[in-house]
Image: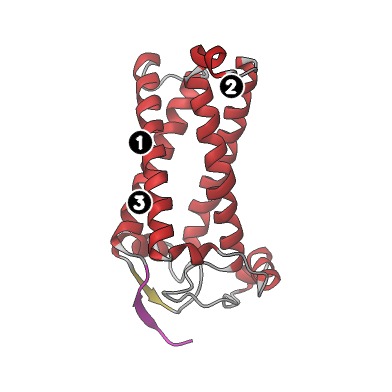
């Protein structure tokens, strides 16, 4: 494949991506501190940061969904089985043998089939689940008025499970950013908006 340079990520996508990254990392750090895992910010500050970052994340998430719906970018997350097995094979062993990626990245096809399934699951299930359990936790004193019948420990456990799933995705996501034509190629693209090198998926 010949070398190319094309505009892939809009300014909103890049700002949204890095804001979400900052909020999610802060939520994970403060959340695990509130569980007593370590001491970093101090309990009071960690609690306040967790609440405000959680609210900020919810607002940003809603705005992102609105943006996807009104710009047509939601099509980037439409599931497809075409070349799905080829992509899975590539990540399991083809990538370690230096084989080219089976799906070429283009401005109108930013995500490969595996990414589409992953991101769709995260946006439609994991993130709403995490936010819902967070709100349940936050509004615990209003459960009776809202008619919610649940143990606080159950909500806490569900929220913690969601946090570990988000952390797992974050670790894999960071690793996958290193699989481009250079270690920081995909990070650079998410900073500048421009994809450089061969048109291949991360």
How does the figure colour the protein chain or chains? secondary structure
Tell me how far mark 3 sits from mark 2, CA to CA.
28 Å
Marks 2/1 in contact by CB < 8 Å: the verdict is no
The residue nearer to you, when weighing 135 against 170, is 135
In the rendered image, the vertical position of residue 69 relative to residue 83, given as above or below: above
**CA neighbours of label 1 inside 10 A, class few (<14), some (14 to 19), many (20+):** some
Q: Say which mark, if any, is on residue 56.
A: 1
Q: Is residue 18 magenta?
A: no
Of the residues under marks 3 and 1, which one precedes in the sequence?
3
Instruction: Find numbered disc 3 in the image and state the secondary structure of the residue it sits on.
Output: helix
Q: Residue at point 43% right, 68% down?
A: 182
Crowding at mark 3 (Cα within 10 Å: few <14, some 14-19, many 20+) = some
Instruction: Name the residue at 57% across, 42% down.
Output: 126
| Secondary structure under the numbered disc 2 in the rendered image | helix
Q: Position of residue 156 (x, y in %)?
A: 58, 22
Q: Earlier in the sequence, mark 2 or mark 1?
A: 1
Q: Give the residue displayed 35% in from the left and 77% down from the top.
A: 6
Asked whether the viewer can see residue 41, the reply is: yes
Q: Position of residue 172 (x, y in %)?
A: 55, 51
Q: Give the left or right position of residue 44, taking residue 86 as reference.
A: left
Query: Observer-nearest residue: 155 or 86?
Result: 155
Mark 1 lies on a secondary structure that is helix
The residue indicated by pointer 2 is: 156
- In the picture as drawn, the residue positioned furthest to the bottom comes out as 2
Residue 13 higher or lower than 165, as above or below: below
Q: Which mark is residue 16?
A: 3
Locate residue 98, reporting x and y percent: 59, 74
Horizontal side of 52 relative to 147 (left or right) equals left
- Distance between the alpha carbons at the discs numbered 2 and 1: 20 Å
Residue range highlighted in magenta? 1-8
Q: Is residue 1 left or right of residue 153?
A: left
Q: Position of residue 91 (x, y in %)?
A: 63, 65
């Amino acid at each position: 494949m010949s070398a190319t340079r094309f505009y892939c990520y809009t300014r909103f996508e890049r700002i949204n991506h890095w804001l979400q990254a900052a909020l999610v990392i802060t939520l994970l750090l403060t959340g695990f501190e509130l569980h007593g895992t370590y001491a970093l910010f101090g309990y009071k500050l960690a609690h306040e940061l967790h609440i405000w970052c959680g609210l900020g994340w919810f607002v940003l998430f809603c705005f992102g969904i609105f943006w996807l719906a009104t710009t047509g970018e939601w099509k980037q997350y439409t599931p497809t089985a075409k070349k799905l097995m080829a992509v899975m094979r590539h990540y399991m062993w083809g990538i370690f043998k230096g084989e080219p990626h089976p799906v070429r990245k283009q401005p109108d096809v930013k995500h490969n089939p595996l990414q589409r399934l992953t991101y769709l699951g995260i946006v439609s299930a994991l993130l709403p689940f995490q936010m819902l359990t967070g709100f349940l936790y936050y509004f615990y004193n209003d459960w009776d008025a809202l008619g919610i019948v649940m143990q606080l420990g159950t909500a806490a456990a569900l929220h913690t499970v969601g946090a570990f799933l988000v952390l797992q995705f974050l670790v894999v996501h960071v690793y996958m950013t290193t699989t481009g034509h250079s270690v920081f190629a995909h990070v650079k693209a998410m900073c500048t908006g421009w994809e450089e090198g061969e048109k291949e998926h991360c």
